[in-house]
Amino acid sequence: DDDGEDEERSRVDVARRALSFRPKILEMQGAISALEECAVPVVAAVHGPCVGAGVDLITAADVRLCGPSAVFSVREARLGLGADV
């Protein structure tokens, strides 16, 4: 059945695409870890929306200052996934 083979091939392609994104994810995680490991105190100032990787970034700071317009969103929670914070 050709349809079954095409479906299997498309699933493999999705997996390969996700795997090819891994180096970029590791680079971003390294940047956030570097902030966390910084020898001097790190202050994060938030004005307006702070979403996704922005939330990850400010959790690595020693101090977080938020203005009255600051709004935070971790979209993974809405999808029922565990956030990587």
Image (spheres, helix red, strand yellow):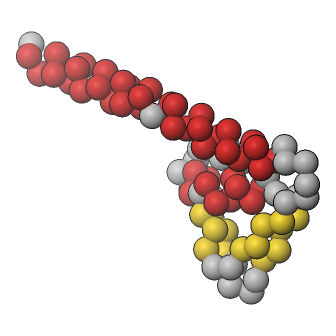
Residue 13 falls in which quadrant of the image? top left
Point 67% across, 45% down: residue: 31
Point 61% across, 74% down: residue: 49
Quick one: which residue is furthest to the left in this view?
2
Q: Where is residue 2 in the image (x, y as percent from the top left)?
A: 8, 16
Q: Position of residue 8 (x, y in %)?
A: 24, 19
In-image side of 45 versus 83 (left or right):
right
The reply to whether residue 13 is in sight is yes
Above or below, 54 relative to 76: below
Quick one: which residue is furthest to the bottom in this view?
68
Above or below, 74 relative to 27: below
Quick one: which residue is furthest to the top in this view?
1
The reply to whether residue 11 is in sight is no
In-image side of 56 versus 19 (left or right):
right
In-image side of 45 versus 19 (left or right):
right
Asked whether 20 or 31 is in front, the reply is 31
Q: Position of residue 36 (x, y in %)?
A: 81, 47
Q: Position of residue 42 (x, y in %)?
A: 85, 60
- Say which quadrant the N terminus sits in: top left
Asked whether 29 or 18 is in front, the reply is 29
Residue 46 falls in which quadrant of the image? bottom right
Point 76% across, 73% down: residue: 45
